[in-house]
Amino acid sequence: MLRPEQMSKVSVVGSTAVMERVIETVHDLRLVHLADYDDSWEGFSPGTPIEGSEELSERLVTVRAIESILDVDEEDAGPTRVIDDEELGEEIERTRTRVNELDDRRVELREELRRVEDRISSVRPFARLGIDLDLLSGYDSIDAGVYRARPAEVEAALRESEEVEAFETFSEGDVVAVFVTPGREGVISDALVGVEVSALEVPEAETSPSAYVEELEHRRTQLESKLTGVENELEEVKLDVAGFLLAVEEQLTIDVQKKEVPLSFATTERSFVAEGWVPTERYPELEAALADAVGDRVVVEELERMDYDGHSESVAAPEGGTIGEPTGTPTAADGGEGETKRKETRADGGEQTTMHEEKPPVVLDNPGTAKPFELLVNLVGKPKYTELDPTLLVFLTYPLAFGFMIGDIGYGLLYMAMGAFLLRYDSEAMQALGWIAVWAGVFTTIFGYLYDDIFGVHMADMGLGFLPLAGVLTKGLQTTEWALLWIVVSLLFGIIHLNIGLIMGFLNEMSHGVKAAVLERGSWILAMNGLFAWIFSLHLVGEKPEFLVGSESVLNEFLGFAGLPAEVGLVGLAAFLVGLVMVGVGEGIAGVAEAPAWAFGHVLSYLRMVAVLLAKGGMAFAVNVLVFGSYPDNGYIEFGLPGTGVAAGEADFPGLVWIGVESGSILLLAIAIIAAVAVFVLGHILVLLLGITAAGIQMIRLEYVEFFQKFYEGGGEEYEPFGYDRTHTTE
């Protein structure tokens, strides 16, 4: 579970006569992550697409273009269907012709509609003026123009102009018609140089502006009606052919994959070699499937089996052969035997030939319950093949810490409901988020039960105090001892969490040798644990915080543990110093400079857990105080009318509900109840959402920054087996 599935590199060698059957078989298996041939073998060249691939690619482009025009998406898919290749071309062409005709008509109507709307926009200012369009131009002795400007500024500029002998303006709002003499072209624009104006072009029309606007608006209505009709026709076509198009696209995608995959092969005139990666335990499945399909006309071999330090393990050689060496050498283009340029010496002394040096792809191997948490890991990057996979540990720690920080039955049930809602989506990412929310909700509910909280209300106050273990824990809002205990618990959780990360880092570094592992990670294990062994020891106990160690410590109060013996503390301090020296040897002065952060600061980062716990508990408490009130007898929420178990007038704050009750007014009571319900619902929704951002993001930060930093790099290659997962078609 902490390692990905073991991968084996395989080779398939055969004659071109059976290549298509081999491709069909491998495609249906969806098992082989193909390697691309790098053109490094003498006598071999990259393969060429199988005949017909170009035509299929053109059809696929056509189908996708039609889908784009019709705005087809996955939700429009119908039932799965079998695609008849013989009728496929004719049906695509009929659909393309019909859709293109409608789309061309839609484009024409939209363009004409745009032009009409532009003309309406240009004529409306003239309609506001109320001057016929033929009166605004065509003069010999008068210069005329229409502008958007402030009429007063235009008139002032015209009066000040020495070139203007006489003028007249007509305005409506910011639209101004100007007539001036003399009629020399440009006299108006020269006069208005210092004025902010925008010239309006006079449209050509034989009618009045208002009549012309009405005519254009009528034309616009006609065009909109026609456009709606065309779009309705396209929608009808979409309903008719969407399922067919999605199925055809899928089938053509599959066919193109099969036709073009020889581009990844090494080929001669009469033979081909294909290589790729398969999960080791499924290699016999590949071997058996190809044997059933083409018998002994291909040679299938397991070239190498990768271990987790990046080296290949020995693979049993075929009878009479050599490990990793094909029993039938591919025929070269000239009829001779093909020889490779790249040979690698195996651990057992034999030789293997491979077409491309590459790292195996990664197939994570996690149980179903932990698998959704791969999403959180992959956001950083898929683990390398040689790295430990942290998914299981994220599954074990993330929901636990989230539940500890929120700890409320009501919120937990709502988180589970939100997760169940996300599970309705087909998207793998959404379903993974849904399961993460469900698990976070489960632990939030469990801790809520232990904290005795339902939306910040004690179950005991609701008459449920008889339930076993309910309220065995307390968040620490009213009792300092519990708050201090959670500080210590957060530190201990951080120490354990970081130790797991450092141990995983140690194991990862073992691939570089024991010395590298000891200096790179063992040093930090010594330094961090040594420092905190001293902190939690009785050595110099009087100089340390009382709640941490000693007779007054919270661990002594709750568990009877005052601290580690002073001698253990001194050993821890020595281990810390030895760890620092090892860090200096392995990482130099820069590593020593990081010691405060790695050995101490990263553990203190886990105090954000108790901070969120108290903050969210305090927010829920504040909401309930506003609604129900609080009384000095228990310092918390009192349910029941004032005076029930509490002397009248002793409320710290009576709460919205009881303010209405005490008023004696039905109207004020109704207002108070409505306000109380609104505050309760909206307040707890706010706390719920802030819980996601606070607890969720803070724990992600602890996982990514503090935990992953100790061992994780990421950057593994995604396992993408050759094949296709059909959703719209069936064979």
Image (spheres, rainbow, N blue to C red):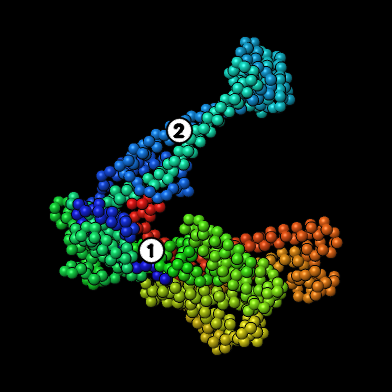
Quadrant of the rendered image containing residue 624:
bottom right
In this view, the residue in front, 490 or 509, is 490
Quadrant of the rendered image containing residue 671:
bottom right
Q: Is residue 709 left or right of residue 166?
A: left
Whether residue 642 is visible to the viewer of this picture, yes or no, is: yes
Label 1 element class: loop
Q: Indicate the position of residue 429 as horizontal and vertical percent values.
A: 48, 58
Q: Earlier in the sequence, mark 2 or mark 1?
A: 2
Q: Is residue 327 left or right of residue 374?
A: left
Look at 67% across and 13% down and name the residue there: 181
Asked if disc 2 and disc 1 are in contact, CB closer than 8 Å, the reply is: no
Would you name the residue on which mark 2 appears? Answer: 102
Would you name the residue on which mark 1 appears? Answer: 362
Q: Is residue 527 above or below residue 237?
A: below
Label 2 element class: helix
Q: Nearer the viewer, mark 2 or mark 1?
A: 2
Q: Type of residue at label 1?
A: Val
Q: Is residue 412 left or right of residue 522?
A: right
Look at 24% across and 64% down and name the residue there: 301
Mark 2 neighbour density, 10 Å: few (under 14) some (14–19) many (20 or more): some
How many discs appear? 2
Q: CA distance from mark 2 to mark 1?
A: 48 Å
Q: Indicate the position of residue 322 as horizontal and vertical percent values.
A: 19, 68
Q: Give the number of the disc on residue 342.
A: none
